[in-house]
Image (cartoon, rainbow, N blue to C red):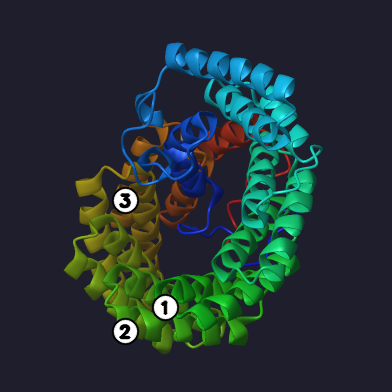
Amino acid sequence: MKGDKDKSVNFVLADNGIQESKKAVEICKLEIKSSRISGDRKKKGYSPGNPYPAYGRLEETGKPETGKFIEHSRKALEVSCKKRNKESEEAVKEDFGTGYDLIGETDREIEFHGSVNKIPVETADTKVERNRIGNLGNLFHKMGDIRKAIQCYDQALKISREIGDRRGEADTLGNLVLAYNSLGEIKKVAEYSEQELEVLREMGEKRKEGLTLERLGLIHGFLEEVRKAIRYHEQALVIFRETGEKKREAATFGNLGNMYFHQGRVSKSIECYLKALHLFEHTGNISAAGSASLSLGIKYSSLGKMEEAIEHYNYALKAFRRTGNTRDEIAVFTKLGFTYHALGKVRKGIESYEQALEISRKIADKEEGSILEHLGRSYISLNKPKTAGRYFEQAFKVFVEIGTREKEVNPLRS
């Protein structure tokens, strides 16, 4: 459950993530900039919701239009400098940053966004200043300079708290969560997630509160703090039921199932996975239903209930075939091979292993060597040492080819 210290937690932050926020920022950038250049901040073109900026929406804007925008900004900057209009100069320099962002020249983008903060603007709007610092943080994050991004987010967070902007505070905390997660500093991820949760509760943002609780559950699961993880997942579950989010509810039941399994409460884990499976079926999520059924097979197998395990493996196999999920097909065939072997149906187990091997070779899957080992051990059980030896030799070659020379092919290894 717990990986190396430099690993990050695998969770999806759909609401506060940089990628989604940048999409929103990019879609409305040109309309905001165009209004600034014209000097009319109150006209409709300044509104982020207006779909008709000067050069069209960002996703429809190509390099020629961006070039016009940069040139327009250059002329505006010359005028502002001549008139000694510092506020206008600041806005136009930020426009330059936007133009270079659109054509992928991130270094120049940062140069202009960064220079904004060096201009003393007597009439500066604090919230706008916070947004600029936050955007600069996003740019550093995009370039992989996470420490600089964090410095910007810290400044933006301080301003948000000073002006009492709870929405800005929550969003900035979300960005700090992502930044520290990128660095693998999971304790910091937990710390800022807790702060974000507090703000979201004060704001009454139920859905985002649920997502943050779910994230905290995943974090504490990663840290092997299973009881804490269960508490957070259970709180998230209550919210997702209140808001009617069946997909999130299903995923949360799956996460709870994992935690109960790690506690050794296998029956409770199965109960959660059965609920998850039902909800995934109800919402039409075939792939997720397959994953839940695969997990159920593993849980039943751990209890020695092999027939129930086989039933769920076959269900998962059908689901993965429907969705074209070949890698998970390999996992199911391998589990079936093991289960049939445990039931004494060695030849049927070999059939499953051979199907897993066939798919593995087609897609160059890394499990090929392990499957060959399983086949070798199966033929040992049938008292066919020569056939077993051929499979062990093939397995050894595969392990050497993929660089796992330390892996020793052992026919007696369980």
What is the distance, in whole Å, between disc 2 and disc 1 at their CAs? 9 Å
In the rendered structure, are the residues bearing label 2 and label 1 in contact, judged by CB atoms less than 8 Å apart?
Answer: yes
Residue 165 appears in view: yes
- Residue 206 — which label? 1
Query: For mark 2, what is the residue?
Result: 242
Badge 3 marks a residue whose secondary structure is: helix
Q: Position of residue 146 (x, y in %)?
A: 74, 45
Q: Amino acid at mark 3?
A: Ser
Q: Nearer the viewer, mark 2 or mark 1?
A: 1
Q: Position of residue 309 (x, y in %)?
A: 31, 71
Q: Is residue 345 above or below residue 366?
A: below
Q: Is residue 160 above or below residue 229?
A: above
Q: Residues within 10 Å of mark 3 (few under 14, many from 20)?
A: many
Sequence-wise, which precedes: disc 2 or disc 1? 1
- Horizontally, residue 364 falls left or right of residue 396, namely left
- Horizontally, residue 149 falls left or right of residue 35, namely right
Residue ID at (49%, 73%): 214
What is the distance, in whole Å, between disc 1 and disc 3 at their CAs? 46 Å
Image quadrant assignment for residue 344: bottom left
Which one is in front, 194 or 349? 194
Q: Amino acid at mark 2?
A: Glu
Q: Amino acid at mark 1?
A: Lys
